[in-house]
Image: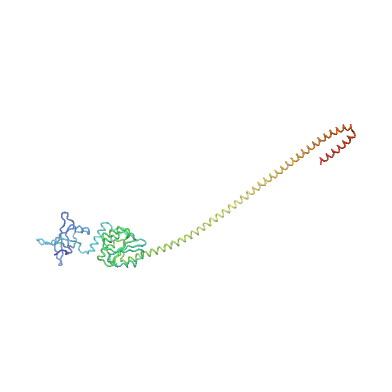
Amino acid sequence: MFKGLLIEEVSIDSKLSLNKNYSASFYTATSISEKNKNHKINIQIDNSIISKFIEENEIEKGIKLDVRIKNLYITANGTITIQASEIKEAGLSNREIKNKRLKKYIKKHRWERREKKTLPRVVSSVYAITSASSDIQADILDNLNAKEQKIVKCESSVAIAKEISSDIAQGHDIIVLYRGGHEDANMDIFSDEVIINSIVESRVPICTALGHQTDMPFIAGFSDINFSTPSEFAKNISSKNDEVRKNLYNNIYTRIKNHFSMIQKRKKENIEHQSKIIQTNISRMINNITKENKARKENINILAESAMRKKKITILNIVKNIKIEKQKIIEQKCRKNRDKAKKIKEIYNNTKQKVEIIERQKRKEKKIISIAVLAIIIVIAVTIFILHK
């Protein structure tokens, strides 16, 4: 008849621990009645229940428990003995007990100081996970300006953790756990060990937007980024995207402006530099041309002098050759004249011989010879006259 009843504020006189010899442990406890009277009772707790309690709670001596009755019997001396089907720390709600359990779980894995992931610069895709009974999709869709939005509904913590770890969810920029309303059983499915594990293992930031501003589910403090409400999440992400885009446009405009200014500046510097180079090159060209002209003038003078010398030499050679030719001509004429004179002399000698012959013949024939001599003399005179001419 007492099975299932809950006895509250039971004080245990010793620290809870597993019984190595038996499957259960006995403890002496004190229960306070409505009239503030203390009642001594014995409690029998199975090792499996103690093991679960130790795993989920910080165990202290003198801890107060709420004990749910499995069996109750009274010994012959009047001592009440209770077999417990469930124990929990007294004075705490189920949610508070669960939160203590989760804190211990996090502390056990040393995740309380883990480095939380930050939001990307621009949130282009959002994977939103909510409970099966949630009907506030408009709070996300109407206020969020992300290009890609996917909303899924889950009925349990295991399903939520599975969605978080899925390749589809991990392919988005962020994952958000959201739900409206107050903390209740539907809100509790977001706070569990499997979800804590999936948040730690996630490659992308996990955001929470659960309940109202006064609500603070356990998972909200463990997630990478927490927002007070789904609407606040959507507005904050949209505002961040708008600000980043605005800054991006301003930066692009500023960079383009600075780029054009730099191009103009470099162009001006390049023009000035090219002008200096051109002026320098022109000066060098003028100097080189002046030097070349001077050298050419000197070369022309040298060539002119050389040509004059060569011309003079040539003229002298020509004059010399002319003299030589003249001398040759004179010598040739002299030779010709000598030859002529020699011939004339030979003719004269021959003529003389002939004259002598004639004279000898003349004696014989005086008259004939005289005529012949006279004729010969005339012929000789005419011949000499012609030759001299």
Residue 286 place in picture, x, y as percent: 58, 54
From the viewer's perspective, is 294 left or right of 63? right
Outermost residue to the right = 367
In this picture the colour scheme is rainbow
Seen in the picture, residue 354 relative to 179 is either above or below; the reply is: above
Residue 147 place in picture, x, y as percent: 36, 64
From the viewer's perspective, is 249 left or right of 95? right
From the viewer's perspective, is 65 left or right of 381? left
Residue 341: which quarter of the image? Answer: top right
Quarter of the picture containing the C terminus is: top right
Residue 382: which quarter of the image? Answer: top right
Outermost residue to the left = 76
Residue 19: which quarter of the image? Answer: bottom left
Which residue is at the front of the view, 193 or 224? 193
Quarter of the picture containing the N terminus is: bottom left
Seen in the picture, residue 373 relative to 96 is either above or below; the reply is: above
Please count the marks in the image: 0
Which residue is at the front of the view, 258 or 156? 156
From the viewer's perspective, is 239 left or right of 45? right
Residue 250 place in picture, x, y as percent: 41, 63
Residue 71 place in picture, x, y as percent: 14, 61
